[in-house]
Image: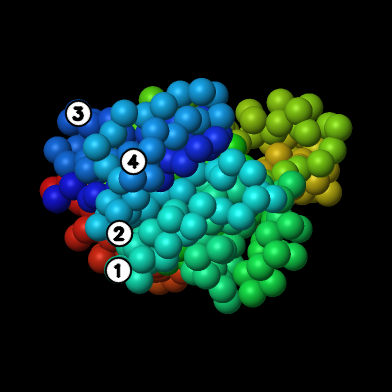
Amino acid sequence: MAPRTLAVAVTNGVPIFELAIPCEVFGYRRPDLTDSWYDFRVCVPAGERPRTAAGFTPETAYGLDALVEADTVVIPACHDVHDDQPPELVAAVRAAHDNGARIVSLCSGAFVLAAAGILDGRPATTHWMHADLLADRYPKVLVDPSVLYIDDGDVLTSAGTAAGLDLCLHIVRNDYGAAIANALAKRLVMPAHRPGGQAQYIDGGNAVDDMDQLAPLLDWARRRLDQPLTISTLAQQANVTTRTLIRRFHTVTGTTPMNWLRNIRIEHARELLETTNLPIDRIAERSGLGSPANLRHHFTRTVGVPPSTYRKAFSAG
């Protein structure tokens, strides 16, 4: 597999954390995981040496014109959501999109994409603190302030801070498969997969306590994906009522027990498709999705391609 050119834009005042995320995920060669990785480029305005919000100045040979040539363009959070975004950056992002690049924003980087006009009529997200401003300033953008990230094909946006890591791992998963993305997540000491539809901000003073009480149940369920698991079964294992279980799941994961379980089963099916030669009916059984037809239905709906197509693209064999 040929390296994918991935370019990150740096302008004055960019927050260091959102810039560090793509550098960490995409910027290091990982020969023990895969022979091919991203051709990573840091791009700055021509003739400038921009400083990040933390005072760092990147050393790079690439200008913003390199964004137009990239397969993927990542825009970290912007310096100030209330300012007009740098015209040369907005123009380069628009040109890159017109040239067929996949455009990604992290946190408030969505304001750059919106200024370029490429979010018009599309669903998009940003940090929940800035969502109302994004919607007011760019009314054509379909802002969803409740999710971690949105994959709209050639344009992807994430919520704030840690959600940028989730989106970048999602990109690795789509490009290189679940096994490599999960291995990378372990190195980063973070969850292997948080679905984009998970809530980005959960309000409630008992969230930490709920997580402490729910974590053993999640581990227990992950070890029994091939077994019938219902809300009643999970509630009984956790020694709580079904109503309490549903509340805790929503507080901790932002979704229902059955939605969480289905996502985990699909993720397990992805790994089995990549790493084994098991027939589809056995993968359906071992992942807990039941029949091949049920596996195909949920897998295609979530991943975007049928299991057989996914296996051909990502199978190690």
Instruction: Please give the residue where the numbered disc 2 appears in the rendered image.
Output: 68
Q: Give how far apart the Cα atoms at labels 2 and 1 are.
A: 7 Å
Residue for point 31% across, 28% down: 59
- Disc 4 crowd rating (10 Å Cα; few below 14, some 14-19, many 20+) is few
Task: Tell whether 272 sits left or right of 75.
Answer: left
Viewer-side label of 3, 4: 4
The amino acid on which the numbered mark 4 sits, given as a three-letter code, is Gly
- For numbered disc 3, what is the local secondary structure? loop
Q: Nearer the viewer, residue 165 or 5?
A: 5
Instruction: Please give the residue where the numbered disc 1 appears in the rendered image.
Output: 99
Q: Give how far apart the Cα atoms at labels 2 and 4 are.
A: 18 Å
Give the numbered dot on residue 32: 3
- Tag 1 or tag 3, which sits nearer the N-term? 3
- For numbered disc 1, what is the local secondary structure? loop
Q: Where 122 falls versus 17 (above or below)?
A: below
Q: Are marks 2 and 1 in contact (CB under 8 Å)?
A: yes
Q: Give how far apart the Cα atoms at labels 3 and 4 are.
A: 37 Å
Residue for point 35% across, 71% down: 98
Q: Where 286 falls versus 300 (above or below)?
A: above
The amino acid on which the numbered mark 1 sits, given as a three-letter code, is Asn
**What percent of the width, then of the height, locates residue 180?**
30, 39
Task: Tell whether 33 sits left or right of 305.
Answer: left
Number of numbered markers = 4
- Disc 3 crowd rating (10 Å Cα; few below 14, some 14-19, many 20+) is few
Q: Give how far apart the Cα atoms at labels 1 and 4 are.
A: 24 Å
Q: In the current view of this chain or complex, which residue is farthest to the front?
A: 47
